[in-house]
Image (spheres, grey):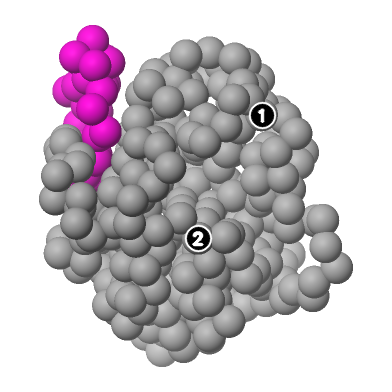
């Protein structure tokens, strides 16, 4: 009886002081009132990963702006190859948006105080394709709007290109960056319409951002995809612990990544110059940023880039591609 009273007082005192107790005898945390195989972290407050302990959250997330770029007609930009499953492009756009909506709604069940907004930058989709997108939006329960790509706005900004596809891709990217700069308050996630996302993607991105950015005490870039090209050279990397998986430092991304308002403003010239002409590599000016800032990607992947099977920028290893594809039908 006396031991029980002392234990209860100790638990209360620990809570008041902001400490968590681990009781390994019954595999629980009395202060959190959870078993140790549950999620022990508290968003915007603390990240707890056994056996590494607690990280106090200093980089808190309040809003996430998602900029989703769509072109529902071009099969693969600047290529004649077919994507995995060889379906019409609209099928990839719809499944990509559906998987994104599912992931955001999943994260909202855990992070109800975080506000999400999606802006779709659409590049001249046919009416029948737009109707399919609008139908998906109407049933999403999310704040989603569609903004048409303004080609004329960028005719005197972007250098003349060999074909209209390249110009449209650059213009779509620039309009997306400008919308991010204008409307982002906290985190901004630039997403292309040929990525399928696992349901926990957004939850893991947000929680791992808070943990890792708080540890390194600076804003960071995050890529949700574990690309094949990351394993085709002998570059060194650092392995970090995120919310529920490992992350690695990288020095290259494509144009699907998450960052912060402050880094978007700080490196605006890099973002802007990425869109003025087709560079080699395309993301040359973005990659320059990663020599100065942290950029990380997950192990294993949170999102799947649906290109063809031979692309070094495509299918992530150790993923059940067919299962993920079917889940977002």
Q: CA distance from mark 1 to mark 2?
A: 22 Å
Q: Answer above or below: position of 29 versus 149.
A: below
- The mark lying in front, picked from 1 and 2, is 2
| Residue 46 image-quadrant placement | bottom left
Give the residue drawn at x 49%, y 46%: 201
Residues at circles 1 and 2 in contact by the CB criterion of under 8 Å:
no
Return the mark for residue 279: 2
Q: Answer above or below: position of 328 versus 30.
A: above
Return the mark for residue 237: none
Q: Callout 1: 10 Å neighbours few (<14), some, many (20+)? A: some
Q: Which residues are magenta?
A: 116-142
- For residue 158, side relative to residue 165 (left or right): left
Q: Which residue is mark 1?
A: 308
Residue 234 x, y percent position in the rendering? 85, 68
Q: Using the image as rendered, state which of residue 201 and residue 190 is in the foreground.
A: 190
Q: Answer above or below: position of 59 versus 40.
A: below
| Residue 132 image-quadrant placement | top left
How many numbered discs? 2
Camera sees residue 74: yes
Give the residue drawn at x 57%, y 32%: 79
- For residue 94, side relative to residue 204 (left or right): left
Tag 1, which secondary structure?
Answer: loop
Q: Quadrant of the N terminus?
A: bottom right
Give the residue drawn at x 19%, y 42%: 151
Give the residue drawn at x 59%, y 15%: 86
- For residue 244, side relative to residue 126 (left or right): right
Query: Outermost residue toward the right?
Result: 234
Q: Callout 2: 10 Å neighbours few (<14), some, many (20+)? A: few
Residue 267 x, y percent position in the rendering? 36, 78
């Amino acid at each position: 009886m006396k031991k029980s009273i002392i234990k209860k007082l100790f638990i209360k005192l620990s809570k008041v002081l902001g400490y968590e107790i681990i009781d390994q005898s019954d595999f629980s945390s009395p202060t959190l009132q959870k078993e140790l195989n549950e999620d022990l972290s508290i968003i915007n407050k603390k990240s707890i990963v056994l056996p590494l302990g607690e990280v106090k959250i200093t980089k808190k997330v309040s809003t996430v702006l998602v900029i989703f770029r769509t072109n529902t007609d071009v099969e693969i930009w600047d290529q004649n190859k077919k994507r995995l499953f060889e379906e019409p492009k609209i099928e990839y756009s719809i499944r990509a948006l559906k998987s994104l909506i599912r992931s955001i709604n999943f994260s909202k069940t855990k992070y109800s105080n975080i506000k999400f907004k999606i802006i779709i930058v659409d590049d001249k989709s046919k009416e029948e394709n737009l109707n399919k997108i609008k139908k998906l939006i109407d049933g999403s329960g999310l704040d989603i709007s569609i903004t048409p790509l303004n080609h004329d706005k960028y005719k005197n900004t972007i250098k003349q290109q060999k074909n209209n596809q390249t110009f449209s891709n650059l213009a779509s990217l620039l309009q997306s960056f400008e919308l991010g700069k204008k409307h982002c308050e906290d985190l901004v996630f630039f997403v292309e319409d040929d990525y399928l996302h696992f349901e926990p993607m957004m939850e893991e991105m947000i929680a791992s951002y808070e943990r890792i950015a708080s540890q390194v005490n600076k804003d960071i870039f995050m890529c949700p995809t574990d690309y094949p090209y990351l394993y085709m050279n002998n570059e060194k990397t650092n392995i970090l612990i995120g919310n529920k998986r490992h992350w690695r430092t990288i020095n290259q991304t494509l144009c699907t990544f998450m960052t912060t308002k402050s880094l978007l403003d700080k490196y605006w010239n890099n973002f802007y110059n990425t869109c003025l002409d087709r560079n080699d590599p395309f993301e040359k000016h973005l990659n320059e940023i990663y020599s100065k800032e942290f950029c990380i990607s997950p192990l294993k992947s949170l999102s799947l880039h649906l290109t063809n099977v031979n692309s070094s920028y495509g299918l992530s290893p150790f993923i059940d591609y067919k299962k993920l594809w079917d889940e977002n039908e």
